[in-house]
């Protein structure tokens, strides 16, 4: 008689859920990991993914900060699915909050298997905060932008 697998084991074996790309976020980076980016399991090293997310997350804040900035916090980071060598990774970002000196962004990462392009799997989601800094590395106020007068209200600004 064959024993049925536990629900947890069945979930682990089930194919990961495909999804659609987010309409409320902007594509800020695409990159393909290579064998040198792997961990001992042969999956892509989490630290490599974090570095790419940090780069991708900085793209939208740079529009507001207009100058030097630093990552002050990785507020949340979830590795939802492993990333494989050769996956095409797409990084989508949106601004969640603009403070006096900081900008917080949400980043979602989607993988397309190289041979089955057009089918997307969400592999990572994260929230990071960047701070505008002056020449001495101290926080400085984010300059006002003319475009903000015409903002559509989707951002929380302070
Ligand atoms: C970034 C840095 C200049 C901030 O200096 P600080 O004296 O801690 O700054 P403050 O406490 O005044 O906070 C500055 C902003 O960061 C925000 N912030 C600080 N810690 C935070 C956290 N854990 N999560 C979210 N936001 C945070 C504050 O709310 C504030 O934002 P606001 O002005 O929009 O409200 C300083 O911490 C630093 O140099 N850190 C090292 C940066 C670095 O090396 N990063 C990695 C490589 S880029």
Image: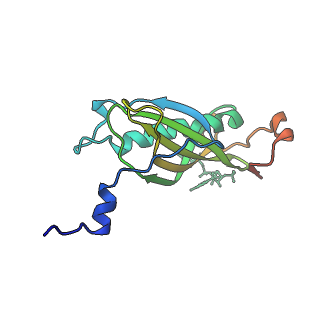
* Residue at the far right in the pictured view: 149
Quarter holding the N terminus is: bottom left
Residue at 31%, 66% in the rendered image: 8
Q: Is residue 143 visible?
A: yes
Residue at 48%, 33% in the rendered image: 118
Q: Is residue 117 above or below residue 110?
A: above
Q: Is residue 138 visible?
A: no
Residue 154, given in percent of the width and then of the height, sits at 75, 48
Q: How many marks?
A: 0
The quadrant in which residue 26 appears is: top right
Residue at 69%, 46% in the rendered image: 101
The quadrant in which residue 21 appears is: top right
Q: In the shown orientation, is residue 156 left or right of residue 104?
A: right
Residue 15, given in percent of the width and then of the height, sits at 35, 50
* Residue at the far front in the pictured view: 1
Residue at 56%, 39% in the rendered image: 92
């Amino acid at each position: 008689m064959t024993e049925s697998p536990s629900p947890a084991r069945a979930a682990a074996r089930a194919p990961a859920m495909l999804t659609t790309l987010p309409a409320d976020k902007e594509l800020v980076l695409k990159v393909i990991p290579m064998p040198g980016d792997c961990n001992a399991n042969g999956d892509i090293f989490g630290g490599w993914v974090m570095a790419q997310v940090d780069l991708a997350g900085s793209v939208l804040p740079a529009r507001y900060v207009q100058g030097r900035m630093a990552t002050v916090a990785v507020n949340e980071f979830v590795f939802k699915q492993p990333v494989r060598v050769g996956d095409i990774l797409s990084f989508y970002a949106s601004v969640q909050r603009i403070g006096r000196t900081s900008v917080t962004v949400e980043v979602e990462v989607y993988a397309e298997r190289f041979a089955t392009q057009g089918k997307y799997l969400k592999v990572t989601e994260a929230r990071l905060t960047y701070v505008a800094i002056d020449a001495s590395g101290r926080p400085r106020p984010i300059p006002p932008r003319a475009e903000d007068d015409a903002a559509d209200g989707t951002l929380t600004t302070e």
